[in-house]
Each structure stands twice: as structure tokens, then as C-alpha cells.
Amino acid sequence: EITIQRPQQLHVVADADFAQLWLFPRLQRFDALHPEVTMTLQSETPLETPPNTPYDCAILWGRGDWQNCRTEPLFANSVFPVAAPGYFDALGRAPDLSDVRDDRLIHDRSSYWWRTILSAANVECKPDAGRTYTSTTLCLEAAARGDGLTIGDEVTTWSYLESGKLVLPFNIRRPSPEAYFLVLPPTDTGNPSLAAFCAWLSTEAKAHNRWFAEFWE
């Protein structure tokens, strides 16, 4: 008698920025290792609390203090201004924050980080000026095509830094109080594919962290 193995189903819910900019580009590697797993990847914007519908695991941006779930930190994170290569070439010198035009500021949902960075440098600039997008991808793409400067972070901006589409024009980096967490339901779902996904995710996260450790040297 031939036994046909049913595909293992895995339901992953993720912050949309993380899903699009970090997880999705790597999923082919997971598929190659685990072709028996059929994944549903549900991306949500914003995803600020654990899902209130059934899920196997979730990846959230926050401080890890959610209720009715189990959490494991994936990435500590830092933020920094980014721009297209050559954005300041017309200056003929290395730029500093005082060279930033406030109408060229690009905000990801809020002006919090621009306000924090400009205030710390005592730069007279209108931190609420410029353009606001509710998608990190749009912010990064706008900066990459030369529309202005935005605030990047180690997770969502990795591919732009690795490819050279964005660079750090200033030696400025601030630790973020928030990070990405792997979130699990309060009780084990008993899904055999979950352990495989979590182990793979941990391996990818460690490789990511090594890349940035070298990048900041």
C-alpha cells in the first residue's frame, strides 16, 4: 500500500514591511529545505498586536510586551538616515545634517525619528515638513530614486544597503527601543512544520546579524 503524505500547512502572520522587505526574498531557501510545507503568509499593516484569529506563528515589530502569547526576540534594531548614492554630490564635500532641506524629508508614518535626530544635532529644520508614506517600501523607494532622505533600519533597509541603492550619508545611528519578535500562540499548536520554520528563521536571523556586525565595523 502506498502512503501519500499530505502537505504540512503553516500559517505565518507578519508585519507587512517585514514580510515584503525581509522574509519574502528569503522564502525560496526555506522552500528548498522543506518542500513538504505549504505556507500561508498573511501580511498585515500595521501589525501591532498578536493575531486574534488562529495562527502558527507571527512576526511583530514592537517591545515584546504583548499578552496571551509567547515571544522570542529576532533582531535588535537601529535606525539611521539614508539617501541615494550621489544625493549630496553637488556640495563637493562631505555632507552634514545642516545640508538637509526640510522639504526633502521622507517620513514613515510619523516624524518621530527625524525630529529626534535633528533635535539631537541642534539642526534648525522643520521635522514635520516633507512627505509622509504609510509604507516603509514607499519611503525607501522614494529615497532610492532621489526624492529626499528617509530613516532606514537594519531589517527593512538591508537589501537596499547590500545592493548599494541606498547609502548612509552621515555617521549617525540610533538604537531603537523596538525590535522584531517571533510570536507564538500561548499554547503549542502541535504543527510539525512550525519547529522547522522557527529553526530556519533563527539561522537566517543570525546570518543577518553577522552581516550588520561587519557592516558597522
Image (cartoon, rainbow, N blue to C red):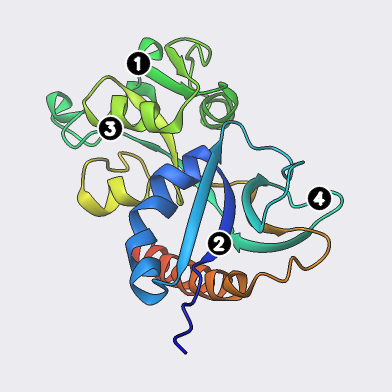
State the mark number for residue 9: 2
Q: Residue at x 35, y 16 (%)?
A: 104
Q: Residues within 10 Å of mark 3 (few under 14, many from 20)?
A: some
Q: Residue furthest front?
A: 1
Residue occupied by mark 4: 65
Specify the amino acid type for callout 1: Arg
Q: Residues within 10 Å of mark 1 (few under 14, many from 20)?
A: some
Specify the amino acid type for callout 3: Pro
**Which of the two discs, 1 and 3, sits closer to the camera?**
1
- Relative to 180, does residue 119 appear above or below in the rendering? above
| Residue 172 seen in the figure | no
Q: Residue at x 49, y 57 (%)?
A: 39
Q: Are marks 4 and 1 in contact (CB under 8 Å)?
A: no
**Which of the two discs, 2 and 1, sits closer to the camera?**
2
Q: Earlier in the sequence, mark 4 or mark 1?
A: 4
Residue occupied by mark 3: 95
**Which of the two discs, 2 and 3, sits closer to the camera?**
2
Q: Residue at x 13, y 24 (%)?
A: 90
Q: Earlier in the sequence, mark 2 or mark 1?
A: 2
Where is residue 44, by image quadrant? Answer: top right
Q: CA distance from mark 2 to mark 3?
A: 51 Å
Q: Nearer the viewer, residue 56 or 125?
A: 56
Q: Earlier in the sequence, mark 2 or mark 4?
A: 2
Q: Earlier in the sequence, mark 1 or mark 3?
A: 3
Residue occupied by mark 1: 104
Q: Residues within 10 Å of mark 4 (few under 14, many from 20)?
A: few
Q: CA distance from mark 3 to mark 4?
A: 39 Å
Q: Earlier in the sequence, mark 2 or mark 3?
A: 2
Q: Residue at x 44, y 86 (%)?
A: 2
